Amino acid sequence: MKTKQTTLDGRFAVILGSEYEKLLRAMPHYPQLQDAIARHAVEALPSPVGTGKLRMILDLGCGTGLTTLALAAHANYGVIIGVDKEMTMLKQYMNNVIEGRKSALENGVAIKAYQSDILAFLKRWKNHSFDAVVSGFVLHNLPKVMRAEILKEVGRVLTPKGVFVNGDKIAPDEINLHNKYMMQQLTKFTQTYTAPEDAAYCIGWIEHYAVDNQPELRYTEAEVHSSLKAAGFRNVKIVERHCMDAVVVATKK
Ligand SMILES: C[S@@+](CC[C@H](N)C(=O)[O-])C[C@H]1O[C@@H](n2cnc3c(N)ncnc32)[C@H](O)[C@@H]1O
């Protein structure tokens, strides 16, 4: 039986979004992945010395701000722009980055956020607007066609040699390994959210993972490589993996 994909829209508008950071209890590796996304993006930025040009970083699907805050902890002299379509998430982003914004400013980093669909937002920017584009756990939520369109736009808005870093739920191509990781994560959900008041949250994540696991939606290593190459990237590398989650780095040709 085919599960409908209608749940893809508004997945973070209600409980999984309003209590998003409770997810970290069942994914203790999440901060480490955020740090890896930020580190790889910032390491690839051009030197701020002598260019007179601000270093521009775009955080696609910025959510509650975890990726932005990791970027702010690593970056200096630049602008971080976050974009997300979900107000439930952006309200938390605004609260969470307030302190981070103050300390980031001391390092010469300004942070701004916009409410928009990612693809529509990317289309508003000129070619070569960003030195780095990052994305944390966003693309796997979208249909494959939209993922490919977004990557094409990311390639267009990046400067030559600009970097795209994506931390995401990325299935290993070896299906038995993927199934093993999937069962580990589902078990972790049931072991973590044991209080009766967490039942809806636990079921919400399990349903979310089941929908993402449909073959027509599952984001695989093979798709990561082929779609990034098709969008004009080279040196596509998975640099870190924890269970179902991985960080991929790609450089624009
Ligand atoms: C799993 S959360 C990740 C948030 C954050 N990047 C992190 O790593 O913690 C995915 C985010 O992507 C956003 N999102 C999904 N599809 C989007 C789209 N088409 N346009 C804008 N935001 C989108 C959701 O609203 C949600 O905040």
Image: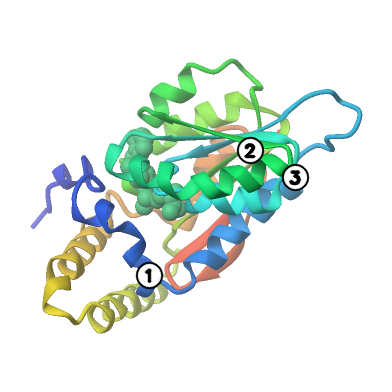
Residue 11 in picture, x, y percent from top left: 23, 47
Q: Residues within 10 Å of mark 2 (few under 14, many from 20)?
A: many
Q: Distance between the Cα atoms at labels 1 and 2?
A: 26 Å
Residue drawn at the location 26% of the way across and 84% of the way down: 191
| Residues tagged 1 and 3 counted as in contact (Cβ below 8 A) | no
Residue 57 in picture, x, y percent from top left: 62, 36
Q: Amino acid at mark 2?
A: Phe
Asked which secondary structure carries label 2, the reply is: strand
Labels 2, 3: front one: 3
Residue drawn at the location 70% of the way across and 34% of the way down: 78
Viewport quadrant of the N terminus: bottom left
Q: Distance between the Cα atoms at labels 2 and 3?
A: 14 Å
- The residue under label 3 is 44
- The residue under label 1 is 175
- The residue under label 2 is 233
| Residues tagged 2 and 3 counted as in contact (Cβ below 8 A) | no
Q: Is residue 124 left or right of residue 195?
A: right
Rendered view: 243 above or below 154: below
